[in-house]
Amino acid sequence: MAVADNSFSMSTMFNASPYPKGISGYIPPPGFAPRASATPLHAALFNLMTDGEGVSYFKDMISKSDKTVLQRMASLLTSDSDYFMAIVTNKYGSRRVQKLLGKSADADALFCAAILRRFLHITTDKYASYVTIRAMVVFDKEMKKAMYEHILYHALDLECNQHGCIALNDIITDADDPYYRDQILDLIAKNARCLSNDASGNFVVQHVLTLYDLRITHNIAVNLFGHCVELSSKKYGSYIVEKLLEAEESMVVVVAELLECDGDRLMRLARNEFGNFVVVKALRFTKEMSRIDQFWGLVQKLMPFIHLLRRSHGSNIANILDSFRLRC
C-alpha cells in the first residue's frame, strides 16, 4: 500500500529521522516496562519526542501532518500510561506534547484520558505539569470539566507541592469557568491556615490574594482570624499576613487581632525577625487607609516598649513611633 508523504508510519519516521542512533539507540525510560503491544514505532516515537536535537524535525513533521496523523501520534503516545509518563516528564517530551494539544479534538480526547489516569503525578512533576497547564487552556469545555473535577479532588496535594502549586496558580489565573474557579478558590480559603504555614501552599494563598477577589480575600482573612499573630512570627505565614494588610477588607480583620493582643505579646511580635515586617505594614496601611482609630490603637500599645524595639528587629517600628511622638 502506498504511503503518503506526510503519513505517520514507521518507515517514514526512520527514513527521515536525523538521529543516527535509530532504534538501536533506544533506551527504555526509567520505570517503563514495554507491554507486549509495544512496537519499534513506540521506540522511534520516544526518540522523536525526547531527543534534544530534534526540535526542527519535530516542528517540520507536525506542520505537515493532518488531523488523522496527529490522532495516530496521540494514540501511540497515550497507549501506555508509563510510556506517556516517561515522555511528559522529559523536558523536551513535555514541550512537544504541549505543541500537540489543541490541534485535534480526537487527539485531545486521547491526551485528556492519559492525563487524567496519572493526573496527580503529571501535575506535580517539574516538566509534566506544564502539559496540564496547557491542556486547561486549549481543551474543550467537557474535557476541562473532567480536569477541574480532578483538580478539586487533589487540591490540597497540588497546593502543597513544589511544582503543583505553580501549576495550580497558572490554572487559577486562566480559569474560564466561574463555577469551578469559585470552587477552587473556596477550597483555598477553607485551607488557608495550613497552606499559610506550608513552603508551597503559601504561594497559592499569596497568588489568590493578588486576584483582588473581595469575597475570597475576606474569607481567607476570616478563616485566619485568631491565628494571624502566630502566622506573623513565621517566615511563610508572615507573607500571607502582609498580603492581607494590603486590602482594606482584610486589613481591618488582621489589625483587630493585633489590637486584641496584650502589649507584651505585640511587642514580642514587633521584635520578631518576620513579625516586625507585619507590624510595620500594619502601621503604614492603617494610616494610609485612614483607619486612624486602629493606627493610634497600635501606637499606644507599642509606645511603652519603644526602648526595647530600638535594640531589635523592631528598630523601624521605633523610628515610626518616634516620628509621631515628636509631633505630639
Image: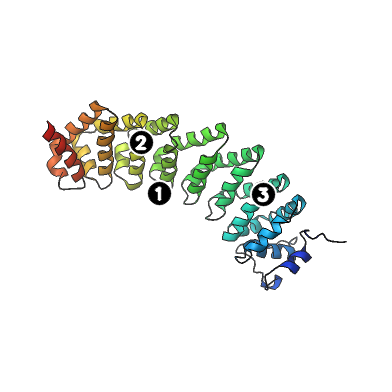
Mark 2 Cα-neighbour bin, 10 Å: few <14, some 14–19, many ≥20: many
Horizontal side of residue 282 vs 46, given as left or right: left
Give the SS element for disc 2: helix
Inter-mark Cα distance, 2 to 1: 18 Å
| Circle 1: element type | loop
Instruction: Determine crowd level at label 1: few under 14, some 14-19, many 20+ residues with C-alpha closer than 10 A.
Output: some
Q: To which residue does mark 2 refer?
A: 244
Residue located at (82% from left, 59% from top): 4
Q: Look at the numbered discs 3 and 2 and tell me whether their residues touch, using CB distance below 8 Å.
A: no
User: Residue 255: image x %, image y %?
Assistant: 28, 32
Q: Residue, x 65% and y 37% (percent of image)?
A: 141
Give how far apart the Cα atoms at labels 1 and 3 are. 31 Å
Above or below, 49 against 181 in this view is below
Q: Quadrant of residue 18?
A: bottom right
The residue closer to the viewer here, 92 or 84, is 92
Q: Is residue 9 left or right of residue 20?
A: right
Q: Position of residue 124 (x, y in %)?
A: 53, 51
The tag earlier along the polypeptide, 2 or 1, is 1
> Depth-wise, is mark 1 or mark 3 nearer the camera?
3
Task: Say if residue 226 shows up in the picture.
Answer: yes
Left or right, residue 307 beside residue 142 = left
Amino acid at pointer 1: Ala
Label 3: few (<14), some (14–19) or many (≥20) C-alpha neighbours in 10 Å: many
**129 w.r.t. 229: above or below:** below
Residue 52 in which image quadrant: bottom right
Question: Looking at the rendered structure, which numbered label has been put on residue 111?
Answer: 3
* Viewer-nearest of discs 2 and 1: 2
Q: Which mark is residue 199?
A: 1
Which numbered disc covers residue 146? Answer: none
Q: How is the image coloured?
A: rainbow
Mark nearer the N terminus (1 vs 3): 3
Residue flagged by tag 3: what amino acid is it?
Phe
